[in-house]
Image (cartoon, grey):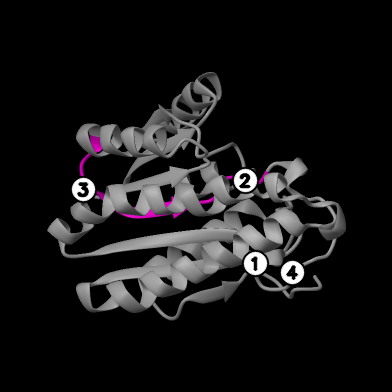
Amino acid sequence: MSTVAIVGAGPGLGAAVARRFGREGFRVALVARDRERLDDLVAELAGEGVEARGFAADVRRPEELAAALKAAAGALGPVEVLQYSPVPHRDFMRPVLETRHRDLLGPIEFSVYGPVAAVQQVLPGMRELGRGTVLLVNGGTAAVPHPDRAGTSIAFAAESAYGHLLHERLAPEGIHVAQLIIPGSITPGHARKDPAVLAEVLWGMHRDRRGFRHYADDLDG
C-alpha cells in the first residue's frame, strides 16, 4: 500500500485529496500545525474508510517539517506522493512598494524552505520505491505576479522555479513533479475550484504524469 503526504492539510482541499487518494488505497499522512484539527480530520476520514494519521508541524520550521514527514514514513510507509499545499498567511500579501526585505522572510520560509525540506526528506524513499510524485499547489500569483501581493508573487515564483528544476531532473528516475495553479479562492460548489474537483485534478496529475504546470481555472476566473 502506498502513502500520500499532504502538507498543509485542512478540511477543504486537504481532506478532499485524502478522500480521493484514499479511494485508490493510499494511506494518508496529514501534516499541519494544529494538532486538534488534525485529530478531528483523522477521525472524520476513518469514518469514511480512509486510513489517515496526523503529524503536527509548522512549514516555516524546516527541521520540524522534515521530522514530521520522517515520522509519517515510519508509521505508514515510504511517501510515494507528496502534496505541498499550505495556505499562505494574509500578511504575506503586501503591496510591492510597502514590502521591505524583512517582509519577505515569511513568504520565502513558507514557499521555498518548506518545499525544499519536504522534498529532501521524502526523496530517498521515492528513490527506493522507484517511483514518486511531488505536487505543488499555488495561487495565481505563481504565474502572474500581482503588485498588491508582493510576498506570494515573489515566493511562489521561487517555488515554481524549484519545482520546474525538479521536474526536469527527477523525471528520468520515475519521479514526477508538477504544479497546480488555482487562481482566486478554492470555492465549494464551483465547477472548477470545488475541493473535490481539484482533488480529482490532482489525482489525474499523479496518474497521467504529463507536464509540469497545470491550471485549475482561467487566470482571470
* Quarter assignment of residue 176: bottom left
Q: Looking at numbered disc 1 in the image, what kind of residue is underneath it?
A: Ala
- Per the image, the residue denoted by label 3 is 1
| Mark 3–mark 4 distance (CA, rounded to whole Å) | 40 Å
Q: Relative to 193, does residue 5 appear above or below in the rendering?
A: above
Image position of 216 with respect to 6: above or below: below
Amino acid identity at mark 2: Leu
| Residue occupying the point 50% across, 60% down | 136
Mark 4, Cα crowd under 10 Å, few <14 / some 14-19 / many 20+, is some
Mark 2 lies on a secondary structure that is helix
The x, y position of residue 18, in whole percent, is 45, 45
Q: Which mark is residue 105?
A: 2
Q: Which residue is mark 4?
A: 145
Q: Evaluate if marks 1 and 3 touch, with contact meaning CB atoms under 8 Å apart.
A: no
Name the foreground residue: 214 vs 202.
214
Identity, as a three-letter code, of the amino acid under mark 4? Pro
Q: Is residue 3 left or right of residue 100?
A: left
First to last magenta residue range: 76-88
Q: Earlier in the sequence, mark 3 or mark 4?
A: 3
Name the residue rendered at 79%, 57% in the picture: 149
Nearest to the eye among marks 2 and 1: give it: 2
